[in-house]
Image (spheres, rainbow, N blue to C red):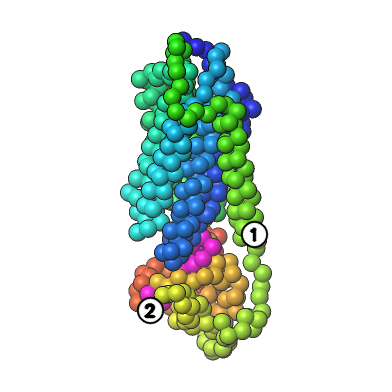
Amino acid sequence: MLEHGHNPYFVIASLAIALMSGFTGLSLTQGASAMAVARRKLVVSMSAIALGSGIWSMHFVAMLGMTLPIAFHYDALVTLMSALVAILLTGIALLLVHFGKRTGLRITLAGMFVGVGILAMHYLGMSGIQGVKPVYSAFGAVVAIVASLVLCVASFWTSYGHREKRNILSGTVAFGVTVVAVHFVAMAGTHFVEIDGAQTSGLWLSNELLAFGVTLSSFVISGAFLLVGVTFAAGQSKPQQVDQTEFGSAEKVTTEVSARGPLQVIRLPYESDGQTHFVQSKDVTAIQAEGRYSYLYHPSGRLFCPWSISETEARLANTSFVRVHRSYLLNTVHVTSFERKKDNGVCHFDGTAHLAKVTVSRSYLKQVRESLGV
């Protein structure tokens, strides 16, 4: 058996790569389920490449930091295949959560696909080592498999259980820690033996050439991380109160008189069949956040709106809408009954706009009751 160790600086670098790729991939798909199919396919593909190449890059950054008493290198074809396997399985996972109704079963299956992708990438990549032979203990392999599946399912539930920004950040940490943990758990159950008289056939990669490829991949991941990070951070700014008349024909303002006094009615945009249409805010029952976009609950259906929930709230400042939850704005005109709970409340509707009720969170309870006059 050959003794092996790891350079701690490469361990830290591998964790950084896993975190950056996780953030890039998970942020890219925020709101993807509401996009047109063609655009969604592109975004999901880019995310799969970011996550899959991040898994591959993390693995080989860590392997570059592995020390053995003898020289070794890698089979080029097997090394490339290990990257493609990671991207493919990650892509299947993203297809599950972004095409079709997102259910608990789909989220769990998606996490398992990513877990299998990490394992397949790791052991396929290890099989490409030339000059020495990795030997796996049965216990170490079992622990690595269980850790990969459990941690990946947990990370996907963190990321996709609710698609808020904080969930994406938590999911990023969960994904990064999962990839690194699975790698080093598997390595803890791995030993190496020297192969006497081993001869290399086909194209092979030295550590120096592999380092060049991994550096290039890491550079691309870092660049994508910075670009996505700028967009992500920009969306964190607090909404400003906006003059409703600044938005021209896309948001024509009229005035409606109610028991509460004069209320503005504006036109809200929604996208369908490649066109932008408009509905009046007074006909909309509620607005639900979906990443950087939102959905309008209207008698004609659940409509995709290109505005974020923060932007929508700002533009609806002088209307009958009120924030009831971090993900919901409600039109108080359509509330048919209010139910007081211990720590929150529930607004009920007649169901004609594909919505029966919405929970009012504790932090917004006071202002909702004031708006309803109860």
Give how far across and how far down residue 294 sits, in percent: 49, 67
The residue that disc 2 covers is: 299
As helix, strand or loop, the secondary structure at mark 2 comes to loop
Span shown in magenta: 288-301
- Please state which of residues 30 and 283 is positioned toward the viewer in this rendering: 30
In the rendered view, tell whether residue 317 sits above or below residue 236. Answer: below
Q: Nearer the viewer, mark 2 or mark 1?
A: 1
Camera-nearest residue between 374 and 103:
103
Residue 329 vs 17, above or below: the answer is below
Give the side of residue 293 with respect to residue 112, left or right. Answer: right
Rounded to the nearest whole Å, what is the CA distance between mark 2 and mark 1? 33 Å
- Does residue 292 show up magenta in the picture? yes
- Is residue 99 found inside the magenta-colored segment of the image? no
Amino acid bearing label 2: Pro
Q: Residue at x 64, y 27 (%)?
A: 9
Who's the residue at 41% across and 40% down the image? Answer: 85
Q: Residue at x 55, y 14 (%)?
A: 70
Give the main secondary structure, helix, strand or loop, of the magenta stretch.
strand
Q: Is residue 14 above or below residue 305?
A: above
Amino acid marked by disc 1: Ala
Front residue of this view, candidates 315 and 370: 315
Residue holding disc 1 = 234
User: Can the viewer see residue 37?
Assistant: yes
